[in-house]
Image (cartoon, rainbow, N blue to C red):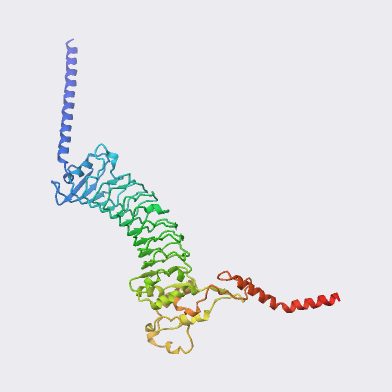
Amino acid sequence: MRRVNFAVKFYFILILLTCVLAKLKKEKERKKVVKLKIENNNLCTIEGNSAPFHCFCSDGTSTTNATKAKCWVFSGLTPEHSLWTLFSTQPHIIELNVMVTPMGELSFIPTNGINNIHPYALANLTKIHEIRLAKNRILTLNPRAFAHLLNLSLLDLDENRIFELNRDVFVDLPLLKKLFLKQNNLSAIQEGAFRQLGHLVELELSTNSISILTKDTFAGLGELKKLFLSYNKIIMLGDLTFAELWILEELDLEGNQIEFISDRAFAGLTHLTKLNLSYNKLKNLRSNLLDGVPAITNFDLRHNQLETLTFDNVKPILHNFYNESGYFYLTSNKFVCDCRLAWMHILRNETKNQVIRETLDELMCHLPTVEHSNGRIATKSALSYEGVLNRRRHPSEGFPNTGSVGEGDDDNLYDEDDDDYQQESSLQNRLSILQKHDPYLRHLLQIPLSELPCANETKSSTQSPRIYINTPSYAEINANRCLTTIGNFPTVLSCCILICVCLT
């Protein structure tokens, strides 16, 4: 009996000790948490290795007068974490730089999803000027992700994983001037996404997957001056695509897949001075495409598939390329050597702009081919072309003028044995290399203006059926029929006499 009583007492004491130890452990942990909260009462003085992020401040630390903060994000940072509330301890920050460590992750922008702790995690930073969140892993921008930042002027979200831009992401940002979203996965921009950014000056959307633009895509951006859309997947530009951008000065559309541009795509852009359409798939331009953009001084059409560029195409802006401030790039297209390019000769001879002169000097075109009855393929005035191209000129003489090479030009030719002119110019050397791959490739300005064939000239008259560069006119067709009838008149007359003899 005594043994039983002893065992009961022993177990009772053991249970009591266990309860006491558990209570002491809980109290110790509570004091540790309180101490941690007391230590982490300032954004610039976060302590402890377990903290998911640390901030280093300048111009003030322990007090509330810091103006710059650089924060490093480690693991374990959630939208509900209490550390977000510490931004309110430094209300004078004007520059915030958030970076993610190799082992860290930041896949969200804190918004009103953390209502229990801090409805707008960045909203208290009313004096902040710049926020840089580039090179993170941000996937989604929820509504009001950036709201009530009254002095924010720059927002950098480059090189993230954002795939869609919804409405009301940017709210009450009255001084925002620059927004960078380059190199994300953007494929969709909701209409009105920028409607509340009425003072934005520069918008960077390059290197994304944007394929469709409408008039409402850029609604509200009445003060935008620079728009970068290079290296997206845009195929066409419809009417009034940029109609809301009244004072736009620079538009970059390089490296898309643009095949068609509507007549009024650039309508209303009277302040546009720089237009980049290089590295697209344009085969032709509408004759009145540039009527609404008379101020363009920098025009880039390199690396397209243009077969011609007529005087009517460039007439609204051509006057801007005669001074030294303009730039006009045309190389690496598929131009045909004909009189539709004759205006380039005149521009080359009259412009004061050395860059434009060099661009036109290097411009290549393909001779229109003519197939003769003997099966050989040649070109109109082919011998004249070769004569011009093979002449050796002194560098001081310049390029051929707009006239043809006439007789009596022996004074301009050089002795083949002259040591000063044994080597051809680099321009001729490049042409020789290219002609090995394409024998009909020529430098446009080395073809005399008078020898450029025009579109209404037919190919060989002995060819049957006739092939024209352009469809012949109705009058030309009737004229050819009349000539055929007159040529066959003797045969018709003989048939008539034979019929009369038979009847008699």
**Front-most of 195 and 277?**
195
Horizontal arrangement in the rendering, residue 491 relative to residue 308 (left or right):
right
When the figure is inspected, residue 455 is found, relative to residue 158, above or below; the finding is below
Horizontal arrangement in the rendering, residue 340 relative to residue 142 (left or right):
right
Residue at image point 20% right, 46% down: 54
Horizontal arrangement in the rendering, residue 306 relative to residue 176 (left or right):
right
When the figure is inspected, residue 486 is found, relative to residue 213, above or below; the finding is below
Residue, far right: 504
Residue 246: quarter of image: bottom left
Residue at image point 57% right, 69% down: 471
Residue at image point 81% right, 77% down: 498
Residue at image point 82% right, 76% down: 500
- In percent of width and height, residue 74 lies at 25, 45
**Front-most of 276 and 239?**
239
Quadrant containing the N terminus is: top left
- In percent of width and height, residue 307 lies at 48, 68
Tell how many labels: 0
Whether residue 405 is visible to the viewer of this picture, yes or no, is yes
- In percent of width and height, residue 298 lies at 36, 67
